Amino acid sequence: MILELKNIKKAFPYRNCEEKGITDHKDGDVNQVLKDISISVDAGEIVSIIGPSGSGKSTLLRCATGLETPDSGEIIYADGVKFGLVFQNFNLFPHMSVLDNVSDAPIRVAKKDKKAARQEALKWLDKMGLGDRGAAYPCELSGGQQQRVAIARALAMDPEILFFDEPTSALDPELTGEVLKVIKSLADLHIAMVIVTHEMAFAQDISDRVIFMDGGLIVDEGTPGEVFESANPRTQAFLGRYKSGNW
Amino acid sequence: MSLLTMIAKMSEGFGRTCAIFFLTLIFSLPLGMIVALLRMSKNKVVSAVTRFFISVLRGTPLMLQLLAVTYGPYYLFGISVSRNKLIPVVVAFSINYAAYFAEIYRGGIESISPGQYEAAKVLGYTKVQTFMRIILPQVVKRIMPSVTNEVVTLVKDTSIAFTVSYQEMFTIGKQIANSQTSFVPFVVAGVFYFVFNAIVDFVMGRIEKKLDYYK
């Protein structure tokens, strides 16, 4: 086991938003996004987290990666385990070339040798099918290409576990396909991956384990076969549309 | 007095005008960043005090601030007014412009998407690295048009130094105008400022263009 999340709880205060006509929240009202979540991830394991919007999937990833502090619970990484995160909106550094985006953190943060880091960055870009775009700037790339650079950037820090927060939600179907293909190709690296996604076929295909979250709780968990054939009515309701082919 | 003599005399003061201009930029540009960071401090007292000072500096005339810096020490503490007026002029200008630059910097910093900070944090950048390598370069690009505005204003504001009789170009021009009962020195001064600002515009435009390599 390389990561264990124990009894994670997280609430956000409601914000009244007059533009949207939401003004009925009282001070002190909170939105309990994560009610009590425990998850463990093994080395090299691929875990998909699925569930409706607002179910707490992204918040869970943000807690696991230190972007949010849970109200209670524990996050335990095994000794020396490093993680990476791929964002929905890529969050590339616009003022840096693609190569610098990928190699800057290894050089500045991991203090790797400059030349070696750049070579390694090129290797990752090559694996992403972008070996020839190192000199380009993010604004010159398509969304799919930008996301692949972001994946290379995360991989260049040698993570043992890589989180994906809806990596294709900002992309059109064609670009989604190319990014999913690249993520799938990472399976042979034996890096653990935790993927929050709305791409059901992809989750079913790639995962060792699928977690279905709803309302801040884990409703269902198991192999893709188990979850996609689950007898749980809530799981069935959520997956019904996908399975009936109306996805 | 011939036109050429006027121009020659006013040119002598032009060096001092340039001194005010460049020294003010050298001091106020970095000082503004410090003020901006204090203004954005999570410490509410620090941020409120900074905010108050910014509002005073922006809400009162630069001329008044210049008089206060130049003669204030004499009236308050009996310290004799410094003979070299360049010092109070640069001090007053630098503080005043730092307040304006601080607000420009703050706007720039706050316009950077939180995702940039988050990406840097997950990659392990320290706070200082994040600011210097990720945030600041993007801020510089975004604020260039507003900074250009302030720099252009500064060129013209140097003439305010005449209130403390610092012998810069405008002060000399005004003296000539008085002694010769002539309007010509003011026309000469106008041309000087206009040409100076044409150069400023050109240089700032080049810098903006240089930062145009990304969106």
Image (spheres, grey):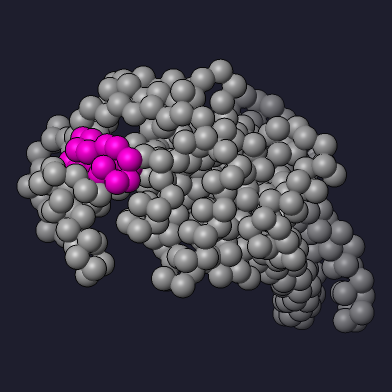
Magenta stretch holds residue A223: yes
Where A228 falls versus B214 (above or below)? above
Point out the stretch of residues depicted in magenta: A210-227
Residue drawn at 80 percent across, 39 percent down: B83
Residue at (51% x, 40% y) in the render: A162
Q: Is residue A202 left or right of residue B83?
A: left
Foreground residue among B58 and A84 = A84
Which residue is depicted at the point 35% across and 58% down?
Answer: A201
Quarter holding the C terminus of chain B is bottom right
Compared to B89, does B75 lie above or below?
A: above
User: Is B158 included in the stretch rendered in magenta?
Assistant: no
Majority secondary structure in the magenta region: strand
The residue lying toward the viewer, choosing from A51 and B202, is: A51
Q: The N terminus of chain B appears in which quarter of the rendering?
A: bottom right
Residue at the spot 59% in from the left edge and 21% down from the top edge: A80
- Residue A133, image x and y in percent? 71, 65
Where, by quadrant of the figure, is residue A33 drawn?
top left
Name the spot of residue A103 as percent of width and height, x first: 72, 46
Front residue of B192 and A218: A218
Whether residue B97 is visible, yes or no, is no
Seen in the picture, residue B188 relative to A117 is either above or below; the reply is: below
Residue A229 location in percent, x, y?
A: 21, 48
Residue sitting nearer the eye, A209 or B139: A209
Q: Is residue B4 visible?
A: yes
Q: Residue A207, percent across and down?
A: 41, 45
